[in-house]
Amino acid sequence: MLSSNDRSDTGQSLDLRTALKRRQILDGARQVFLLNGYAGASMEEITARAGVSKGSIYHHFDNKDALFGFLIRAEAERIARVLPAPDPNDPDPASALRPLGVAVLETLDNPATIATLRLIIGALGQFPHLGEAFLQDSLGPTVERITVYLDDRSVAGVFRIDDSRALAEGFARRCLAQAMERVLVTDPPHRTDAERSAVVEEALWGLALAIPSDQGE
């Protein structure tokens, strides 16, 4: 008879095997979707590329739609995890948002992210709301953190903002627009740190966030 510790170890082993198998399937699926697009991909090809049985792939995912949706959500969560929050102790919003803006651009410029965005664009005919959902899951948490930061600064009397969320969304949208330009170009040139910083400065000034240091004194 298994002890409680034995059962716990067995459960952890099963969870690990399940996670590894799912990752194996997702790695194969990503390769096939990127190569053929959503419409051109088949579960048979994904099964072969992932090196798993058909029974295994259908054990984890009901169909191609479910597999594709899970893959896109996983990519969105990856982006959300790596983006930092503004420094809550920095009273200057421009200073607080500069490193965040650079991080957004670095993440969106990543070849893996560019490939995912191209994949989403190609699948919008089948999934009209996929792009909106991806942006909400990937950049939504960052927009929320910026909103909270701006609200806190406003309450502290540093400056007055009527709609912090609109301002946060506008900042993220401007950074995204710069990334989307690269998505539409084959083999876009490498963007330097100085170029990213210039884009962020433009976004800050465009949103009137480059507030003078004597604001609120």
Image (tube, grey):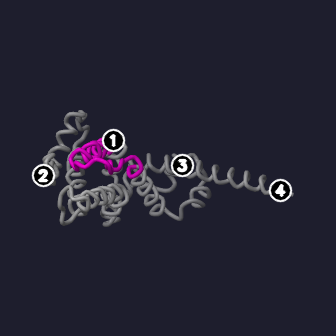
How far across and down, in percent of the image, does residue 196 sit?
22, 39
Helix, strand or loop at label 1? It is loop
Residue 189 rendering spot, x and y as whole percentages: 23, 35
142 horizontally vs 65: left or right: left
- Which residue position is annotated with label 1? 110
Q: Amino acid at mark 2?
A: Gly
Give the SS element for disc 3: helix
Real-space Cα distance between discs 1 and 3? 20 Å
Identify the mark nearer the N-term, 1 or 3: 3
Residue 102 spot, x, y in % from top left: 27, 42
Q: Is residue 141 left or right of residue 17?
A: left
- Disc 4 marks which residue? 2
The residue located at (24%, 41%) in the rendering is: 186
What kind of residue is marked 4?
Leu
The residue lying at 37 percent from left, 59 percent from top is 137
Q: Quadrant of residue 133?
A: bottom left
Q: Nearer the viewer, mark 1 or mark 2?
A: 2
Q: Which residue is mark 3?
A: 23
Q: How would you classify the magenta stretch by its main secondary structure? A: helix
Q: Earlier in the sequence, mark 2 or mark 4?
A: 4
Sooner in the amino-acid sequence: mark 4 or mark 1: 4
| Whether residue 121 can be seen here | no
Mark 2 or 3: the one toward you = 2
Tell which residue pokes out farthest to the right in this image: 1
The residue labelled by disc 2 is 206
Earlier in the chain: of badge 3 and badge 4, it is 4
Question: Between residues 141 and 126, which one lies in front from this camera angle?
Answer: 141
Determine the CA span between mark 4 and mark 1.
47 Å
Does the rendering let one see residue 53? yes
Q: Residue at x 31, y 60 (%)?
A: 148
From which residue to which does the magenta span run? 79-107
Q: Amino acid at mark 3?
A: Arg
